[in-house]
Amino acid sequence: MVSGRHRNRAQIRRGAAVAGAMAVVLVVTGAWFGYQKFTEPACSGELRIRVAATPEMAPAVQAAAAKWSSDGAAVGGVCVVADVQAAEPVDVAAAVAGQHGVTLPGVGQASGDAVLPDVWVPDSSTWLLRLQKAAAGFAPSNRASIARSPVVVAMPEPVAATLGWPDKKLTWNDLLGQLTTGTKLKAGIVEPSRDAAGLSGLLSISQAAATAGPDAQRQTTGALRALAATKSVLREDLLQRFPRAGDPAAIAAALSAAAMSEEDVIYYNAKKPPIPLAALYLEPAPISLDYPYAVMPGIDPARAAAAGRLFELLNTAGFRDRLGAQGLRAPDGTVTPGLSAPQGAPSPAGSPPGATTPQPGGTAAAGGLAADVVERALSTWSIATQSGRMLAVIDVSGSMERTVPTANNATREQVTVAAASKGLGLFDDSWAIGLWTFSTNMVGSQPWKQLVPIGPLSSQRTKLLAGLTTVVPKPDGNTGLFDTTLAAYKAVQDGWEPGKVNSVVLFTDGKNENPGGLTQQQLIAKLKAAIDPERPVQVIIIGIGRDVSRAELEAIVKVTGGGQFVTEDPAEIGTIFLKAISLRPPATR
């Protein structure tokens, strides 16, 4: 289950760890005696369960499962064989999402030969959290942690020393200052939508930026763009960007900081690089990798029972003694035998670093992590670090004058404009953006009006902000949705740019009402005729309030691609806007 793009890490990880793990199967030591209680005197037949474990965990699980089977693993008199395969979490997540008819932002589609496991041991519960948010039917059982690895900031030791390591205790705010106003560390990140340690670092740096008061948005976008300048899709690739020689020039030119797991640092330093990495345990402690044991929903009772027995086996002292060889801690964060923790690691007697475990629907105050927090962080990351070409089209019909009680009685128009203005601050100068408004009879009988043509933000950011201040409802205006949608689609298509996601983002609080304009049937026919596979245009429609016709919106995006998002509470439009933009497909090249 290891895809080609991740095979390098799976094969290299921990050198000969897999070979060593298989050797353990041939050696019966005292540490394994307790496993006998998970077997039965005799069994017949065969019950096979599929287990997918993240590559750094797979050798220990493989060895334990193999020993269990050789000792006579059985459930109800049937012999059990646990087939444990190393699998990158992003690959399994893509397969699970595909099974439920959804996609996770940044993850993409599963490979055609992906096989869903009965048991999944990813590196972080954030994968389960994201899948449960996207797919209502995904409800794995158990989910208890079987190991842990704190998330740290990995730095070449000479660079860390300039910041006071190992004597000085550093915070995420200290790192934020270095990224945005200080010495400009050359920081990097593994794409956080595809890597749990990268996501943990993103959440921590975003939280630090959120404390910057009125300057929070500038701090956030500055930090994210600094990280994105040296981002990587693969963790192995990012590790290779740390200095490969000890001279000052090599150190200065190389990567100087990245959110990684403690296990990553141990793995890297075990290869005796010219410049070892320091592990900085920043405060407040980020979400750690917690290696949940997730029994997939829908498996039959016999396999579920076998999965339960295997979990009991992986929750013994004997199994935990194997974790140290993999650079991993026990589930409670304490150091396991054989683990050589990096310098500066918290004492085993103290609170385990990064002990917070994300829980579906949880809140930070409850010791968990809300799915909405993860979604918002990834949405902000996507907007701040991707390039696009977009036409924003805002409804100014009379109903946009209605007040929103949950937004201090601001009007729907004011809430929409505020969301658009805030979103504009996240886009960098590589974007091209235009602004229209629409209602009915805006220019003669034409229902739309161009305020700012699509153009580079580098030259017209001020024009767009000024244009937004002129957006006010037309008291007697209706909603010319269909004609405006077609015109906006063609306008984006006419100036289509390769290498960017070309899109229309339309805000509306009503259904189409434009006497003499296009009917829905006519609109759909004209959109189908206009579609050019070589120049795709995504249409994203954000519906506000209860008067929106979901059927109308769904019919449009079914033809054009994109998505429709409807919120009955207009105060949520800012969050919806971020989510909508982040779900854009990869740019066509």
Image (tube, rainbow, N blue to C red):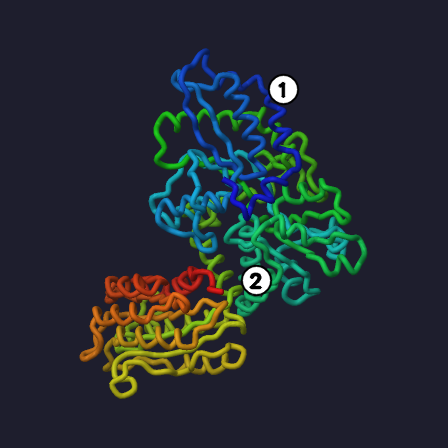
Residue type at mark 1: give it: Val
Q: Nearer the viewer, residue 357 or 64?
A: 64
Can residue 367 be seen from the camera position used here?
no
Where is residue 369 shown, x and y percent of the image? 47, 48
For the residues labelled 1 and 2, the Cα–Cα distance comes to 49 Å
Q: Residues within 10 Å of mark 1 (few under 14, many from 20)?
A: few
Q: Nearer the viewer, residue 429 or 376?
A: 429
Question: Which residue appears farthest toward the left when viewing the image?
Answer: 515
Disc 2 target residue: 224
Question: Which residue appears farthest toward the bottom when viewing the image?
Answer: 444
Question: Which residue appears farthest toward the right when viewing the image?
Answer: 247
Q: Residue at x 73, y 61 (%)?
A: 253
- The vertical placement of 418 against 95, above or below, is below
Depth-wise, is mark 1 or mark 2 nearer the camera? 1
- The vertical placement of 488 against 59, above or below, is below
Where is residue 541 shown, x and y percent of the image? 33, 67
Task: Give residue 411's quadrant in the image.
Answer: bottom left
Q: Residue at x 63, y 51 (%)?
A: 237
Q: Residue at x 61, y 17 (%)?
A: 28
Q: Would residue 243 appear left or right of 1 to someone viewing this image? A: right
Disc 1 target residue: 27
Q: How many marks?
A: 2
Q: Residue at x 57, y 59 (%)?
A: 208
Residue type at mark 2: give it: Leu
Q: Nearer the viewer, residue 551 or 200?
A: 551
Q: Would residue 36 appear left or right of 346 to someone viewing this image? A: left
The dot on residue 522 is none
Q: Residues within 10 Å of mark 2 (few under 14, many from 20)?
A: many
